[in-house]
Image (cartoon, helix red, strand yellow):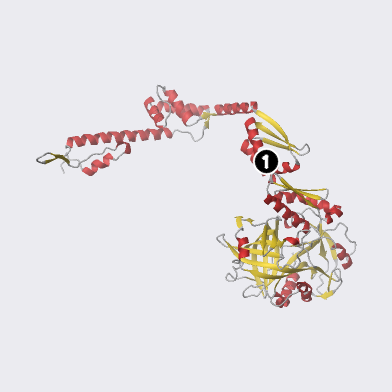
Amino acid sequence: MPPSIIPYRHLLRLGCLKRNYIRHLSTTPICLEDANAVKQELLSDQRLQAMVAELEKSANLQQGNDILLESIETLKPSQEVITAKELDKLVSVFENSFSVRQLAQYSAVHHLPRNKRKKRQLIDGIVKKHWGIQTVEEYDAAREQEALERRKDLVKETFPASFQEMFFIIGSNGDTIRTIEEDHQVLITIDVEKKEYTVEGPSKAVVQAKKEILTHLNIIQEEVDAPKGIKENTQLKNEVNESLVDVSKLAGSFITLEKDKFSLASTSTENLMNAKRLLNLMLTEMGATSKKALDSADHTVVHKHMEYTVLPMQDASSMPLYDKKLNWNKLEYRNKDEQDDYVVLGSQDAIGGIDNMKDLLVKPLHVGDGDNVSLEARFGKLLFHDDHLPLTSTTTNISALFKNRTRFLNCMPPRKITTPYMPIIHSLDGGFHQRTIQLEYVNQWLIEEEGRNENSDLKRLLVEFLIQEDGNLNVNKVLAEKNRSVVDVVGLHGRIDVRLVAKQYRSYAAEDEHVQALLEQCKLVSYGEMAAPKQQSILNQQLALSDISFISKKRYLSDDGLISVNHVEQQDKKVKRTEMMVTSVEPQTLDTSNAIERWPSFASILKSIARKWEY
């Protein structure tokens, strides 16, 4: 190709070097029509070369501008506050490296003032205005000026407030008051004795903070009569009063006991109903109502020749919030008597050994044909709350110990106690490790003073979710409990207390309409928190949420017994504990029904574990 001819494609490439300099050139023949003929004419080589030179010049100019901008940007300090010496050095570099035209060009790109400005003014505009660079002295002076202006505008206002209002201003663990202080840059002081609070800060901030405080004070109140047991027992009343602080925090409502009435204050109807639920649960568990405590036993069995020592016992992390502050005691056994010589406490009925306790446990259920009954056992200590301890160790005095309120405290098992047992294989119900969430509901009449519905077939409801490896939840089981029977065996083989539980139940499918309505409202909020209905109607029965438990299990199999070591965290009761549990199962399927027929094997496992219970 002759050197005087410029390739067409090369011309277009040069024309597209920079978008701002694109010129549309056409080498397409121009058609000039006249009456006789059509004449075609192309641009001359000289004209094309001139246009290409113009494009190359524009591209070079733009490339130079880019290099200039990048060169100036590399001088920008990493911090906005520098020393005066560093600033002088930076200005010196600008003065020696760039001309006025170059600085003006940079200012134009960033829309900075540049007309009729001297070099130092252009540098200050770039460094101080555009980059925001200032010296330490300038920064400190600016802060002092701001502080001075704030002090001039500083106001302090005091407002009256009731105890209920102060509770909601402070919020759960102080979250509300801290948030208001941080959002509006004010200081809020609560004076409980004077029943007032003070807001201090800039005038506009104080006004805004006061407005936000008022949004937390739309309070609704309700009064409830205290149960008769509280009115007649001063000590019980004091214990309830001490627990109300923790229950109020948990419920997000302010609960007080004055003149034999509970006063409940809340900011929403939903929170008020939740406060009543938690209050009813607490009063029932503390034995303050005419209703039987949900966690109490029907019978207590002791060894006829037991020798023991009374010791104090306190494990705050394993106890519900309303039991943490009480003084509890336990029995430490001095003799390891394995003779089957047990009696029912209070009646002195001899029942022999644990092999003969089946009738005592199962008889109250009135089991009929086709009824499903499960058996389970937990190991721990039966605690009693009593300030007047006996001087001698006889079963008569044991009766005196356990005549008042008791609590079965599940205990962590000895480290090597599970060594002889076979871990569950993966193909059987998920394998050795299992993490579940259990929701426990109780019939409303079990915790309400005026409730009466003893013949209901739905006294409790257990909903268990299985947490998959990917974090998803699957419904594992839904059990409706008709009846339960509980027997506490004190000092089995002189080593450990055992709680036996028999449950008469029926299974629900997750697809059942009345169950599905409940399941759809259950949402996992975080690793250790689930949102679930506090009250739910199922089959015309009003159920109240008792608690939500997160359970991590290690599971073993021994004959007909499913042995699990569980780490349990209860959401409402604020309990953390490790327990050992034995459940009677069909070993091929882990089915818990028809457990009564497996009683001999179940009792044998319990005796074997009790003999090895040593720390």
Given residues 76 and 484, the one toward you in this image is 484
In-front residue for pair 491/440: 440
Residue 353 at what x, y percent from top left? 80, 75
Classify 10 Å Cα crowding around label 1: few (below 14), some (14-19), many (20 and above): many
Q: The N terminus is located in which quarter?
A: top left
As drawn, which residue projects farthest toward the left?
Answer: 36
Specify the amino acid type for callout 1: Ile
Q: Horizontal placement of 526 versus 319: left or right?
A: left
Q: Is residue 164 above or below residue 79?
A: below
- Residue drawn at the location 29% of the way across and 34% of the way down: 58
Q: Is residue 44 left or right of residue 551?
A: left
Would residue 348 be seen by someone viewing this image from the given angle? yes
* 91 sits left or right of 428 in the view: left
447 horizontally vs 510: left or right: right
Q: Quadrant of residue 517?
A: bottom right
Q: Is residue 535 above or below residue 485?
A: above
> Split into 4 quadrants, where in the image is the C terminus?
bottom right
Q: Is residue 612 visible?
A: no
Q: Position of residue 500 (x, y in %)?
A: 75, 69
User: Residue 6: x, y in percent?
Assistant: 20, 40
Name the image quarter holding residue 217: top right
For this rendering, which residue is in front, 566 or 472? 472
Secondary structure category for the residue under label 1: helix
Q: Nearer the viewer, residue 407 or 36?
A: 36
Measured as percent of width and height from the top left, residue 317 is found at 72, 55
Displayed quadrant of residue 457: bottom right
Q: Residue at x 76, y 54 (%)?
A: 322
Which residue is tagged 1? 177
What residue occupies the far right of the structure in this picture?
391
In this rendering, the count of numbered labels is: 1
Q: What is the residue that sits farthest to the front in this orientation?
A: 540
